[in-house]
Amino acid sequence: EFSAKFPIPLLQLANLPIRKRLTLLIKEVNRFNPNIIISSGERPLWLGAVLKQLYQVPLLVIGHGTEFLQAHYWKRSLTQLALRQADQLIAVSEYTAKLMREYGDFKVHIIPNGADDNVFRPNLVTDELRGQLGLNGKRILLTVGNVSERKAQDVVIRALPEVVHSHPDVIYLVVGLPTRKKLLEDLAKDLGVSEHVRFTGVISQEMLPIYYNLCDLLVLVSRRVRKGSAEGYGIVVAEAALCGKTAIVSDHGGLPEAVHHGMTGLVVPEESPTETAAAILELLRNEHYRTQLESEALRHANQATWSQRIQAYDSILQEMVR
């Protein structure tokens, strides 16, 4: 799907040994003769540094977060060596930039993630989807992302008993790869809120804007997990905002940078079902306040679309090839 959309060659390397990846990349570099190498992600960062040394081509590194949280000494050493090879460094948040600076006194440009305002728009028709899901007359909470420990859907489920006590019409829609579905279903059953939780599984990109428009609130209360996975920014917050929706996020990672607390959404403490419930109830009860947050979220998102973010990227790229 990606390769069909963009006129660039796409190599599927994820499941290959790193030496095989490097061999294929060398072949592609010889064919393509790039004037800049862009690396994003742990192993691409390492490989990009090798290619820079081999071809003396400028290297741009784009950091997201998780790739800089490795506990293994040898991985951290490789990452540090690779960052030293970079000609320019970009981070998607100040949080990520701070992680990158732990490897050295680097200059890091911060360009937050954006979203496509041609795809994500407010006031899309949701009647058909609402009917298909049996959600007529319901208030919808939405989380988009793999059903995982990091995304912390369990925290929202733990908040639901207090929420549905005041608002029995609330449904929590969980969109994403259902990795921990059984565990969360059991949790919802134990808490007596099974009827208020729906798992959609993976949905198409075409349907995602409609789901955002369908919801009353986006809730993303991610946590840092022991494996070192972290939320670098939270692109779904930007997508939902372009659809005119406010968000409740945790204070983990780069999420507080995606939401201006009290202006475009609310920030709650990580790992706090009580504070999460309080924030949800505040916005469900106070429609005027929620509408204010939605309007400001949309206004802010329209000033931070991918078309605007691309200008910042282009400025750095142009400087690299001068």
Image: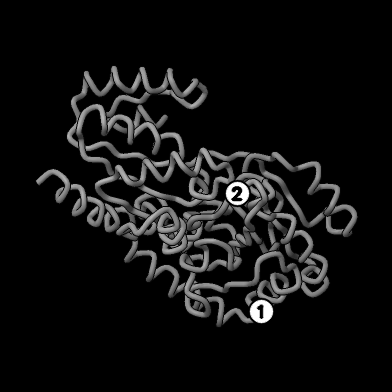
Residue hosting label 1: 282
Q: CA distance from mark 1 to mark 2?
A: 32 Å
Q: Is 234 drawn above or below residue 27 in the view shown?
A: below
Residue hosting label 2: 228
180 or 293: nearer the eye?
180
Residue 90 shows in the view? yes
Q: Residue flagged by tag 2: what amino acid is it? A: Gly
Sequence order check, earlier mark of 1 and 2: 2
Looking at the image, how many numbered discs can be counted on the residues? Answer: 2
Residue 113 shows in the view? no
Query: Within 10 Å of the Cα at label 2, are there few (<14), some (14-19), or many (20+) other Cα atoms?
Result: some
Q: Residue at x 22, y 55 (%)?
A: 311
Percent of width and height locating residue 207: 52, 44
Percent of width and height locating residue 160: 78, 64
Q: Residue at x 38, y 55 (%)?
A: 104
Query: Within 10 Å of the Cα at label 1, are there few (<14), some (14-19), or many (20+) other Cα atoms?
Result: some
Q: Is 160 drawn above or below residue 65 in the view shown?
A: below
Dot 1 falls on a residue whose secondary structure is helix
Q: Residue at x 34, y 62 (%)?
A: 304
49 or 293: nearer the eye?
49
| Left or right: 92 in relation to 188 | left
Q: Which of the labelled discs sits on residue 322, or is there none?
A: none
Q: Residue flagged by tag 1: what amino acid is it? A: Glu
Q: Residue at x 70, y 63 (%)?
A: 137
